[in-house]
Amino acid sequence: MLSVVIIKTEQEGRLKMQEKDLVIRFYNSIEEEERLEGKHGKIEFDTTMKYIHDFLKPGMRVLEIGAGTGRYSLALAREGYEVDSVELVEHNIEVFQSKLREDDRVNVIQGNAMDLSMFSNEIFDMTLSLGPMYHLFDEKKKRKALEEAIRVTKKGGLIFVAYCMNEATLIQYCFQKGTIWEDMKKGLISEDFHWIANENDAFALMRPEEIMDLTREYSVQRLKLIATDGATRYMDDIVDAMSEEMFELYFKYHLSVCERKDLIGASNHTLDILRRL
């Protein structure tokens, strides 16, 4: 039985309006629903779902934080899982609502990743945070979002956290588009070629060692760190033009290398899979 709840949390009220507006404007300006639909987006979605299924068991209760337009939440609900979905952006919630069916066991709540006070401690078997870390620039905010995801997850439960990565962005946007010199002059890139977050950014960029550092102090065990799209976004057009047979072979190749440590940092997106201890 579906339900949609709009909760304006206290933490959400304290979000800087400029920061919040950037996220809202970004998702109002793109077709988030289409991002995972093309062949190149399907690699990210299917890889993420593959690893979710590796750990998912019948009867598990699932939370998705930053659920967007509901692609993952609805897929899991229609497999029979009870899903709670938290999403900040009202436009995304409206699209999500438009896809809900009466028999979908999904609760959709408007809120943000840094305040999950609508949920008690240790109630979810699996917590998915597949978007919030993309947009949290401050270290304290990243930690708060991670702490909340851990808090609501049962001991022994799984936490999946997705990140946007630094190297792919520098290569595909700064070098390929020729803005690297201008960006360096503006002080947007550090001496070791790390993008420096600023108030006009929509995305926070990470490196694998920063993901390790972020989780080090928490009572979690890292099970896997996955390159969810690997080389795919470097050749979107080529992947999209593949025959079904070639695409199936490419996906098989991708899964065979997506856990290789030497390739993870070059992916556009990564997925950190943690177990709460």
Image: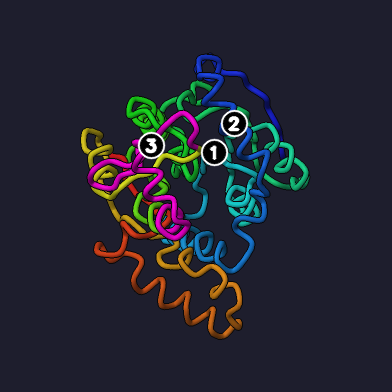
Q: Residue at x 48, y 23 (%)?
A: 115
Q: What amino acid type should be assigned to the residue bearing mark 1?
A: Gly
Residue 157: in sight, yes or no? Answer: no
Dot 3 corresponds to which residue?
A: 186
Q: How many marks?
A: 3
Q: Magenta segment: does it hold 177?
A: yes
Asked if the residues shown at circle 1 and circle 2 are in contact, with their CB atoms under 8 angstroms apart, the answer is: yes
Most frequent secondary structure within the magenta stretch: loop
What amino acid is found at the position of numbered circle 2 in the picture?
Answer: Leu
| Foreground pick, 22 / 188 | 188
- Vertical placement of 118 versus 107: above or below? above
Secondary element under disc 3, as helix, strand or loop, is: loop
Q: Secondary structure at mark 1?
A: loop
Q: Earlier in the sequence, mark 1 or mark 2?
A: 1
Task: Measure the C-alpha gap from mark 3 to mark 2.
Answer: 31 Å
Residue at the location (56% across, 61% down)? 41
The magenta stretch is 172-201
Q: Which mark is residue 88?
A: 2
- What residue is pinned by disc 1? 66
Q: What amino acid is found at the position of numbered circle 3 in the picture?
A: Lys
- The residue that appears at 47% across and 78% down in the rendered structure is 250
Q: Dot 2 lies on which element?
A: loop
Q: CA distance from mark 1 to mark 2?
A: 7 Å
Q: Quadrant of the N terminus?
A: top right
Q: Residue at x 53, y 41 (%)?
A: 64
Residue count near mark 2 (Cα–Cα under 10 Å), binned few <14, some 14–19, many ≥20? many
